Image (spheres, grey):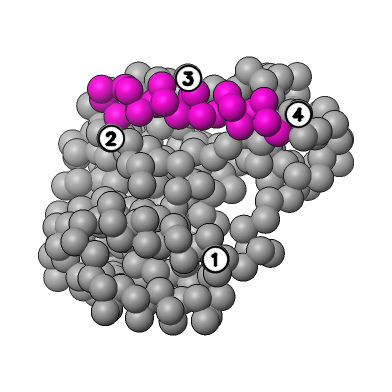
Amino acid sequence: MQIVYHIGANCTDDDRLLRSLLKNADTFAQEGIKVPGPGKYRRLLRETIQNLNGRPPSPDTRDILLDAILDDEEADRLVMSHSEFICVPNRVFLDGGFYNLAAFKVASLARLFPEDALELHLAIRNPATLIPALYHTAHSGDFSGFLKGADPRQLSWSDVVIRIRSAAPNAPLTVWCNEDTPLIWAQLIRELSGVDPTTRIAGGFDLLNAIMSPAGMRRLLGYLKTNPPRTEAQKRRIIAAFLDKYAIDEEIEEELDVPGWTQEMVEDLSDAYEEDVERIERMPDVNFISP
C-alpha cells in the first residue's frame, strides 16, 4: 500500500487542502485511494507514537492501525494530513532549534507502516510571517521564551528538509511554498491523491474562493471558459493576474505584530527564505512544486 503523509507545516493551509481532498473522497475511493476524515487517524497515530516513544512497534501494529483507519476496507493508497504531524506550534523552536523534532517524528511515522511505500508532502512558509503566526497560535505570552533562544535569522528550511530526508530516505518528498498555494492548488490535490494530471477533481479553486472577491472569481471563471489556457503555466499566469486585481486584502494580509519585528527584520528573513527555497529546489531527491 502507498501511505501518504501531508506533514504540514504548521500555519500553512489551515486544513483547507484536506477539506479539498475530502470533497473528492468518493471519486478517489473508486480508484483505490482513501482519504479518511482526520478523526480516524490524528489522535490514533499521535498516541501510538507517544506510547512507543521511539521503540519499534509490535508486528501487528500496522494491521491494527489500518483496520481502525480504513474501517476494514481495502485501499491501494491512504492519504493522511495533519499540520502537527512533525510538531505542535509551541515546540517548533525546542532547544533553540527549528523543527528539531522533525526527524524523530518522521521516523516514527515511517515505522508504523514498515511494509508500505511511504510518501511525504510538506508546505514551507516564509519565517517572516510563519514565526508571528506560530507565536499567536501557540498563545505564548513571552515572545523570547517562545523562541527558546532561536535566532530567526538563522532558521533554515533546507536543513529541516535534509533531516526529513535522512529520517525516511526511501520516501519521496514533495515540497512547496505556502505563498504559492493559490496558483498550484489543483496540482497539490492531484499530487497528494496520486491521480492522473488529467483527472477531473472538485475543489481546485477552493483557496481562490476564500481569498478572491466573488466578482473576481466570476470574472476569472468566465475568462478561463472563453479563453482556455493551453498550458498549466499559462493558467497560473492568468490566476496570478486576477489575484493581483481581486484578492481580498483581509484574507491575504499577514499579522506581523510581535515584539521587535521591524521592517528590516521582515526583509532580511524574506531574502534569506528566497535563498533557502532555491537550495531546496536544487536538491535532486526533492520534488519541488513551483508556479
Percent position of residue 108, x then y: 40, 31
Looking at the rendering, which quadrant does residue 129 occupy? Answer: top right
Q: What's the mark number on residue 226? A: none
Mark earlier in primary sequence (1, 4): 1
Mark whose residue sits in front, 1 or 3: 1
Q: Secondary structure at mark 4?
A: helix
Q: Is residue 146 left or right of residue 47?
A: right
Q: Amino acid at mark 2?
A: Asn
Q: Which residue is mark 2?
A: 287
- Is 13 drawn above or below residue 200 in the view shown? above
Q: Amino acid at mark 4?
A: Glu
> Alpha-carbon neighbours of circle 4 within 10 Å: few (<14), some, or many (≥20)?
few
Mark earlier in primary sequence (2, 3): 3
Q: Residue at x 14, y 57 (%)?
A: 196
Q: Secondary structure at mark 3?
A: helix
Q: Is residue 19 left or right of residue 287?
A: right
Pick the front one: 141 or 11: 11
Q: Which residue is mark 4?
A: 264
* C-alpha distance separating marks 1 and 2: 31 Å
* C-alpha distance separating marks 2 and 4: 32 Å
Looking at the rendering, which quadrant does residue 141 occupy? Answer: top right
Q: Residue at x 75, y 44 (%)?
A: 256
The answer to whether the residue labelled 3 contacts the one labelled 4, judged by CB atoms less than 8 Å apart, is no
Q: Which residue is mark 1?
A: 245
Percent position of residue 130, x then y: 63, 40
Q: Is residue 128 left or right of residue 159?
A: right
Q: Which residue is mark 3?
A: 159
